[in-house]
Structures are given as structure tokens and as C-alpha cells.
Amino acid sequence: MIRHPKRILVTGGAGFLGSHLCDRLIREGHEVLCLDNFFTGAKNNIRHLLGLPNFELIRHDVVHPIFLEVDEIYNLACPASPIHYQYNPVKTVKTSVMGAIHMLGLAKRVRAKILQASTSEVYGNPNIHPQPEAYWGNVNTIGPRSCYDEGKRCAETLFFDYYRQNKVNIRVVRIFNTYGPRMDPNDGRVVSNFIVQALTGEEITVYGDGTQTRSFCYVDDLIEGLIRMMDGPDAFPGPLNLGNPSEFSILELAEKIVGFTGSRSRIVFKPLPQDDPLQRRPDITLARERLKWEPTTQVEDGLKKTIAYFREVLRGN
Ligand code: NAD
Ligand code: UDP
């Protein structure tokens, strides 16, 4: 237990990353306010925390203002999987932009420190590889992914405007593909899709020819990075890349998952979605230097833990 517990708001706290963050903050003895509208999050992710004296669940949509007294805010509210953020693209933009305005307004009023969960998508389909924070990106403004990418880019702009204009104490992290237990089995992201397909014997759907690359970070490593950034020096607002620099192709990922699950599923090829980035790998030099942070979970170990989780979910536990 720490000596000076803080009151911490986690928006999107019932989602995949948010629920792990709530767990970690509760373990450290803080008071956690978990705010969520349950668009992609689930009560199940935080059920074990309900009833704890230092945990509070607030059903709320960040497109509307809210008044709370808090010391820190982690702003994670936003659907992250392409299927979900493209379901209602106008709402996705509102969530990123109005959500950022409302949370920054709150931070300004109560003088809270605030961290924004931004994304590697701000780099779009990058023509610099790996991507350092100084790279401005290559983003389509009018495509099917734009609601997410541009919403997150505008949120970054708002964070830095509130920082310069109102002296709000901000942190901006750009999260690269992260995976682990509590991913929604139906949210269409590649790790959950492939594992569920492999465990149920369905065909494994590789989009395109599978040569596009991603770099996958295990959730525990990512949460450690978020907390180090929040606790890091005020003079370093970011933006900061957080992700695992070990990069491989989507076809290699499919083969690994088939191997680890012992599945007999066939790998099949489907059309590549529009604007799907061809390569992505974080340059994490800054995180290493400033936060002494780097991922410690090997992808084999992370995938095995995630597979074990999905086996339980599919058994109905
Ligand atoms: P997730 O979909 O599991 O979690 C998002 C949470 O936000 C859900 O609980 C959802 O119900 C909630 N939410 C959505 N719209 C809301 C609204 N208008 N008001 C209140 N709550 C709302 O996704 P995740 O993977 O946990 O992502 C969390 C954050 O991290 C997101 O902001 C996402 O953009 C960012 N991020 C995640 C990844 C990743 O690989 N997981 C990569 C880059 C960035
Ligand atoms: N992908 C795939 N099969 C799937 C789901 C995704 O081949 O069933 C591919 C997708 O086209 C992309 C990569 O895997 O190239 C990562 O997709 P995801 O939606 O997980 O994340 P993002 O594209 O946002 O990085």
C-alpha cells in the first residue's frame, strides 16, 4: 500500500486496457473512479472490483461534460478496434474530440494531471520506419479509418493547446498494438480473431497476403508504461511511443498462433481493408531514455497467456 493514495479517474475503465489499469491502480492503493458508457467495455472486466471501498463505477458518456474531484485522469474512452470505431464514425470523432475537451476542462478546473491514450494510428500508413515521435504521419483524412485517426490527432492537438494555453499538466502516449486477456473475442482485432478462430477450428482469416507487419505489446508491459509516464517529470508531456519493437508479419502471427494452440485451422486469405497500414513498428528510444521503460514480455509468453484466457472464455467460465 502506498502512503499517499490519489483519486484517479480512468475513462474507458471497463474496456480491455482500462480494466487492467484499474486493477493496477487499485493494487497500489489508490481510489479509482472507472467511467464508461459500455460501448465496447463490459462489466465483466471489472466485476471483481465492484464492492471494493476504493473503487467506483460511473456509467457516463464522455461526449457530455462531467464534474468530479480527482487528482489524475487517464483518458482511454474510445473504441479501438476498426469494426467498432467504424460502426458509428461520427460518434467516434465526438468521443475523441468532445471527450478530450471535457476531460481537459475537468483537469483544468480541478488541476488534475491528465494522460491521453493516443495511438500509432496518428502515423497512418507510415513512410518512415520504424516510427519515431518526431514523424508527423501519413494519414488519409477522408477514408474509413479517418474517424479514429483524425479524432485521435485532434485530441493530441487539444492536449497541447490546453498545455500551452491553460498550463494543464498533460501526458500524451501513442500506444501501438497491444494484446492480452480481456480483449473482446468479437471485436475483430487480429490477435483475438486468430486465437478464437484457432481454438474453435474455424478458418484463420488473414487479410491481404499477410505481409503487412505489426508489433505487438503485452498488456502488462503497456500498463507499466502508462503509469511511468503519468508519474514521470512534468517537464516531459510527450508525445511518447509505447509498444513492443519486435515486428512480424500478420501471416507469421497466424502461424505462431496455429502452432501454440495446436490448431488444425486452415489459413485463408481475405481482401485487405482500405487504408490498412502496411507496416508499423515503434521507435521506443525516447521511452527507454526518459522512463527507463521497455517491454519485458516475449511474444511467445504473452500469446500463451492470452490463449489460456480465451480457452477459459470459450469454455464459458
Ligand atoms: P476497448 O474498446 O476495449 O476500450 C475502450 C473503452 O472505452 C470501452 O470500455 C468503451 O465502452 C469505452 N468508451 C467508448 N466510447 C466511450 C464514450 N463515448 N464514453 C465513455 N466510454 C466510452 O479498447 P482498448 O484496447 O482498451 O483501448 C483503450 C484506449 O487505448 C483507446 O482510447 C484506444 O484508442 C487506445 N489504444 C489502444 C490500442 C490497443 O492496441 N489496445 C492501441 C492504440 C490506442
Ligand atoms: N487482420 C487480419 N485478419 C483479421 C483481423 C485483422 O489479417 O481477422 C489484419 C489487419 O488487416 C491488419 C492487422 O491484422 O493488417 C492488424 O489489425 P487490427 O485490426 O488488430 O489492428 P490495426 O489495423 O488497427 O493495427
Image (cartoon, rainbow, N blue to C red):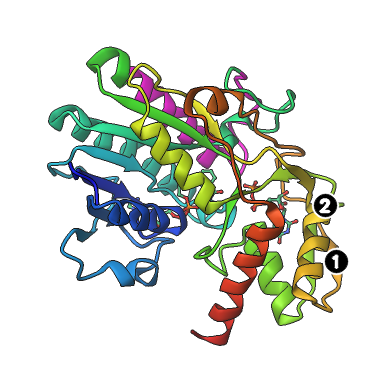
Q: Please tell me which residue is depicted at 27% across the width and 55% down the height of the picture.
A: 34
Of label 2 and label 1, which has the lower sequence position? Answer: 2
Residue position marked by numbered label 1 in the rendering:
268
Q: Is 128 displayed left or right of 309 in the figure?
A: right
Q: Residue at 84% of width from left, 79% of height from top?
A: 264
Q: Nearer the viewer, residue 225 or 252?
A: 225
Magenta-drawn stretch contains 102: no
Circle 1 SS class: strand
In the rendered structure, the answer to whether residue 95 lies left or right of residue 194 reads left
Q: Which residues are magenta?
A: 135-161
User: Looking at this view, is 128 or 93 the one in front?
Assistant: 128
Q: Are marks 2 and 1 in contact (CB under 8 Å)?
A: no
Packing grade of label 2 (10 A; few <14, some 14-19, many >=20) is some
Image quadrant in which you'd find residue 161: top left
Going by the numbered disc 2, the residue's amino acid type is Gly
The response on whether ligand 2 sits within 8 Å of label 2 is yes
| Residue 141 percent across, percent down from the top left | 58, 30
Q: Amino acid at mark 1?
A: Val
The disc at residue 39 is: none
- Pick the front one: 125 or 113: 113
Judging from the image, what secondary structure is the residue with disc 2 in?
loop
Relative placement, left or right, of 183 versus 264 is: left
Q: Is residue 158 magenta?
A: yes
Residue with the mark numbered 2 = 208
